[in-house]
Image (cartoon, coloured by chain):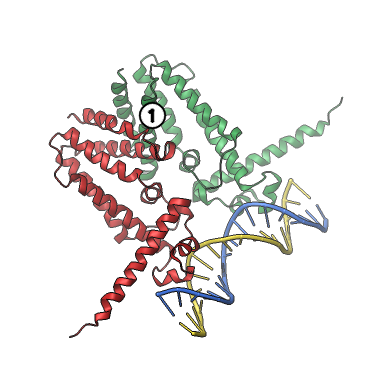
Chain colours: A red, B green, C yellow, D blue
Amino acid sequence: MLVDPMRDRVAERREATRREILTSAWEVAQEKGIAAITLKDVADRVGMRPPSLYSHFASKNAIYDAMFAQAWQGCLEALHAAAGPGLPGDPRVAMTVMGRAYFDYAVADQARNQLMNARISADFQPSPEAYAPSLAVWELSRTLLASIGVTAEADLDLYSAVVGGLVDAQLANDPGGDRYARQLDRAIGMLADQFGF
Amino acid sequence: MLVDPMRDRVAERREATRREILTSAWEVAQEKGIAAITLKDVADRVGMRPPSLYSHFASKNAIYDAMFAQAWQGCLEALHAAAGPGLPGDPRVAMTVMGRAYFDYAVADQARNQLMNARISADFQPSPEAYAPSLAVWELSRTLLASIGVTAEADLDLYSAVVGGLVDAQLANDPGGDRYARQLDRAIGMLADQFGF
DNA sequence: GTCTATATACCGATAGAC
DNA sequence: GTCTATCGGTATATAGAC
């Protein structure tokens, strides 16, 4: 059973075009906000006419869906990279490493953070497949925190609210700066005290 | 120099209509999100045709502007009410009262909170007059925190990020519930420890 | 001050030629 | 797979009659 040797090249090219479209969509989102993306803006940047995008994505929301998955997949990889060598033995340092990894990733791209955490439009709901890496991040965080003794639901809530609050404050009040980033270690220290480390 | 006795009644009626329009706009915002308000939806609820709204507001953004002012004015009054009788002598209790007043106000209306803190649309920027109550809230908070010994810029940043983070987490992950509200006192206790109370 | 009618400008999405 | 042409819808805003 021979396979067409062209098949791979065609599939590769198709996948490359999809990536191009998504890259352009991210650029538009960074310039005008995630909710302000239009197919015209994306198509202009790719060098296509808007209807041609439908050869690669079934709808505008399908583009959002792929972006949502990319955003959380990147977050998952950032956390894995930070915890990969094994979390430091000191739970206080371990929590700092985790919090810093998430904070840095979230703060690096405002549009991406909006897509990950805020509701963009009323009709867009991520598909189960796109939602999977988001769940994976949450599960990895739970596992890592559990490994340093943080298992209470209330503690997880407090941790995520504090780190998330610093992210939002940084992006809203000092984008590109480090005014709230400078409070992160102190905040994690507070949490460590609170959790009894 | 006689004044027309009808003048007052006319002005009153006009003001009442303005209030009706804003009330309807808030209702639409609560149902569909602050960014999804349309003049048609507002007009339907008031019992008008969309163009008639222009007899009372110069533009859609002028409606947002008035809503923005209302939202922060309400917050200012909530803080004044909480601190009016005089803040408790114990700085820890005082900070709890302040934080709770802001948290409760912010969490009570998701659409209002979005208008107050997030950017709604690229073109809407609050006018200086609408922005005034927002500044007043910030100044009052600074004054109240200073009265219990919190003056460092870093401490104010940490306080606002933590309280804001709990607000956002509550609205995003458990709207209408109290999952993060239950962590507020604990969070403020942490901050009090950190500030050396 | 409210109405009808309309201007103007988008948007996402589809049909069909090439 | 990309194009042109277009559909169908919605948005803010204005003009002018009443």
Q: Is residue A104 left or right of residue B135?
A: left
Q: Quadrant of the N terminus of chain A?
A: bottom left
Is the residue marked by circle 1 packed among few (<14), some (14-19), or many (20+) residues within 10 Å? some
Which residue is depicted at the point 42% across and 25% down? B98
Residue nearer the viewer, B160 or B104: B160
Residue C17 percent coordinates (x, y): 52, 85
- Residue annotated with mark 1: B157
List the single residue furthest toward the top.
B89
Write down the quadrant of residue A197 in the picture. top left
The amino acid type, in three-letter code, at marker 1 is Asp
Residue A150 percent coordinates (x, y): 19, 37
Disc 1 is placed on an element classified as helix
Name the chain letter of the residue that bears numbered label 1: B
List the single residue furthest toward the right.
B1
Write down the quadrant of residue B158 in the picture. top left
Which residue is depicted at the point 36% across and 37% down? A165
